[in-house]
Every structure is written in structure tokens, then in C-alpha cells.
Amino acid sequence: MVTVADRWMLQRGGRRLGFVERLSRGWKMTKLGMAVVRADPELMVYTFLSAVFSLVAIGAAVSSSVGLDVIASDPECVGEDCGSELVFAHAAIWFVFYLLVSVITVFWNAAIIASAYERLSSGTNPSFSYGIGQAMKCLPQILVWGVIAGTVGLFIQMLEGLAHSEDAPPPLRLIAGLASFIIGIAWWIVTFFVIPMIVL
């Protein structure tokens, strides 16, 4: 995948960055980006919008789930098995909206990093639309990464739930706890670098 930064370097006769160099640059840009965000509170508007859109998505998920119950409920059904056929539908709804929230978060984080990078590299104060425009240029990659991040995050949560489940055997709970811890740490490190690699 050729990023914006790679194209910029190739156009100027530079070489394309390798994976390790991308990680190093991503780490440096993330630290610098955090410093810029602290110095320029305007960038926090992206974070605010990310929270707003995420809340809208969660509200839509709740509405869809409740609406499904209202439409598909059978008033004549009595017993514990009532509504069991809707469990999969509810799970599918929440899974889709969980991925949507993940994509929203990645998109606005990419906008923050792009704006911070522009300010650091050019010394200018980028407009609000600049970060959105840069994120839109990488929208396919953001969508893919958002889905991957959401899926892995959900898997880690399932492991954590299994680790704290009183119904699971102790050995299984121990394995699930260790797996969720190790995978969670590794995934946090990967996620920390990926967004700068996508947008820069």
C-alpha cells in the first residue's frame, strides 16, 4: 500500500519507507501529534465529533434492537423460549454497529493525526476540513482497519468475559485471562502504530 507520505517521497526522488521505518515514523508522529493536540485544543473538536457520531451509532443500535423486539414479538408466546430465535438477529445488529463505532473512531483519529502532521511539517494551522479531507483519501484503508480493529476488540472482550465467567472451568478461565492479556497488549501496540501508517 502506497501512502501519501510514500508518494510524496517518490515524487521527490526518495525511497519508499520500509515497514520498520514506518513503525519508527509512526511512533514519532504519534508522540508529536499528542504534543500538538495539547498545544492546539482546536484539534479536540475531532474527538468531540467522534464521540457524537459514536453515540448516534449506539443510539441507532438500541433503536434497531428495540424495534426488532416490537416487530417480531409474539404476544401469545409464554415461557423462557420466547424470543430465543431473535438472539442471533440482536447479536448481528450489535456486531454491525460495534464495527461502525470502530470505523468512526479510526476515521477521526486519522483526521487528528493528519492535521497534527500538517502543522508540524509546514508550520501552518490546517483548517478543520483538512484533516477530514486527508482521512477521506484513506477511507478504504480506514474502513478495512476499522473492521479488523472492531473484530479483534470484540474477540478480546469475549476472552475477558470468559475469564470472569463463573460457569467456565478454572483452567479455561485462566487460559482465557492470559490470552486476553497477551493479545490485548500486543493489539494495543499494533493499533498505536497503524493509524499514522495509514494516513501519513
Image (spheres, rainbow, N blue to C red):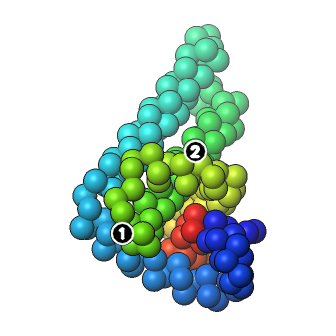
> Which residue is outermost to the top?
76
**In which quarter of the view is residue 69 placed?**
top right
The C terminus lies in which quarter of the figure?
bottom right
Q: Is residue 2 above or below residue 106?
A: below
The N terminus lies in which quarter of the figure?
bottom right
User: Residue 84: where, in percent of width, then height?
Assistant: 65, 32
Which dot marks residue 123? Answer: 1
Which dot marks residue 152? Answer: none
Is 166 positioned to the left or the right of 12 in the image?
left
Which dot marks residue 100? Answer: 2
Q: Is residue 54 above or below residue 82?
A: below
Please rate how many residues cluster around mark 1, counting C-alpha atoms within 10 Å: few if below 14, some from 14 to 19, many from 20.
few
Q: Is residue 64 above or below residue 93?
A: above
User: Residue 105: where, in percent of width, then height?
Assistant: 49, 53
Please rate how many residues cluster around mark 2, counting C-alpha atoms within 10 Å: few if below 14, some from 14 to 19, many from 20.
many
Secondary element at tag 1: loop
Is 1 positioned to the left or the right of 108 in the image?
right
Q: Residue at x 44, y 73 (%)?
A: 121
User: Residue 132: where, in percent of width, then height?
Assistant: 50, 48
Secondary element at tag 2: helix
The residue type indicated by label 1 comes to Gly
Q: Residue at x 44, y 65 (%)?
A: 118
Q: Is residue 15 above or below residue 57?
A: below
The residue type indicated by label 2 comes to Leu
**In which quarter of the view is residue 147 placed?**
bottom right
Residue 109 in view of the camera: no
Q: Residue at x 47, y 53 (%)?
A: 131
User: Residue 129: where, in percent of width, then height?
Assistant: 45, 45
Is 107 positioned to the left or the right of 49 in the image?
right
